[in-house]
Amino acid sequence: MAGNEIVSGRQVGLAGLAGFLDRFLLPLVLVFAGLGVVLPGLGRRLDANGAILITLAVLVFCTGSSVTFADFKGLRAASGRMAVVLAATTVILPVLAWLASRLVTEPALQGGVMAAGVAPVEVASVAFTGLAGGEVVVAAGLLIASTLLTVVLAGPILRLLGAQSATSQLGLLATLTLVVALPLMAGCAMRAIDPFGGRERPLMDVLGTASLLVLLWEIASELRLHASDAVVAVALLVYLAGAGVLGWLLARGVSSTRRSAVILPTAMRDFAVAAGIAASAFGVAAAAPLGIYGVMVLVFGATVVNASRRG
């Protein structure tokens, strides 16, 4: 009896912490971004050992634990809208990124901006969709499909946009499999088997939000801000704004729960994958803008979540 009371008390405490993190997500995002910029040393040391990819994998696992494999059957009802979203983002986002890159004069940095346009859906957008009360399964479906499209089409599209070398499709596929596919399947499997009878949900909620904040801190710690970065930031902001408008247009006429599942995956593209693509296609220096972009998309996601709750 005492043991059950202790477990129950821990669950209540974790549920309270999860509620606190949800309510103050946007200010926490800004605080963690600021910490990464002001105190970057530890974050950079961790990132040198692949901490960003590990944190992403944890975030994907926590997101996957909110759905079961059976839930993906519901994608059939959303398949038409998903096909439109995938087609539009595959064609329009690279064009938007190319147009935004014209604001930057240095070729390598132009390449970094363009890489954001061919990146797949940001992993964190699935978590943000859940936090906004949206259809996580639809967001996850867009994530998986866009990842496959990126592997196949990123190289050819970037060559059309001026890349001097093709991205490594095999290396990209391996990274995305380890960081996205396997953790997502593991999370779904745990939810389907349900070995803890649902008692793990408060812990998964806390761990998911915490991993999101740690991810933001890790990204922000990689920023090495210079006066010239202002122009790059403006270009990325223009691209993000255009992608946000595209997401809003694609979400017109859908239910309120599906709206965030369209807007967030459309507007938020995976900065970590984009950095790898940029380095491969345009050189290492091209990856620099993606740190700025990563902070922007996570702040954007937190803002959408905050707005959806108030609405």
Image (cartoon, helix red, strand yellow):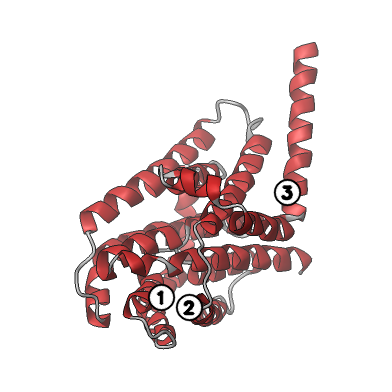
Task: Estimate how packed mark 2 is, as few (under 14), some (14 to 19) or many (20 or more) residues with alpha carbons within 10 Å.
Answer: many
Residue under numbered circle 3: 21
Q: Is residue 117 above or below residue 99?
A: above
Which is nearer the eye, 298 or 133?
298
* Residue 232 horizontal/vertical position (percent): 48, 78
Residue drawn where x is 23% and y is 81% of the image: 160
Q: Earlier in the sequence, mark 2 or mark 3?
A: 3
Farthest residue to the left: give it. Answer: 165
SS category of the residue bearing label 2:
helix
Q: Residue at x 75, y 38 (%)?
A: 15
Amino acid type of the residue tagged 2 in the rendering: Val
Task: Work out whether residue 146 or residue 189 is closer to the camera in this orientation and state it.
Answer: 146
Marks 1 and 2 in Cβ contact (< 8 Å) = yes
Quarter of the image with the N terminus in it: top right
Q: Position of residue 266 (x, y in %)?
A: 49, 71
Residue matched to label 2? 232
- Quadrant position of the C terminus in the picture: bottom right
Vertically, is 252 above or below 21? below
Q: CA distance from mark 1 to mark 2?
A: 8 Å
Q: Amino acid at mark 3?
A: Leu
Residue depth check, mark 1 versus mark 3: number of the one nearer the observer:
1
Q: Quadrant of residue 272?
A: bottom left
Asked if one can make out residue 134 in the rendered structure from this viewpoint, the answer is yes
Q: Which is nearer the N-term, disc 1 or disc 2?
A: 1
Indicate whether 177 appears above or below 299: above
The amino acid on which the numbered mark 1 sits, given as a three-letter code, is Val
User: Which is nearer the eye, 135 or 120?
Assistant: 120
Q: CB of mark 1 within 8 Å of CB of mark 3?
A: no
Q: Residues within 10 Å of mark 1 (few under 14, many from 20)?
A: many
Residue 113 numbered tag:
1
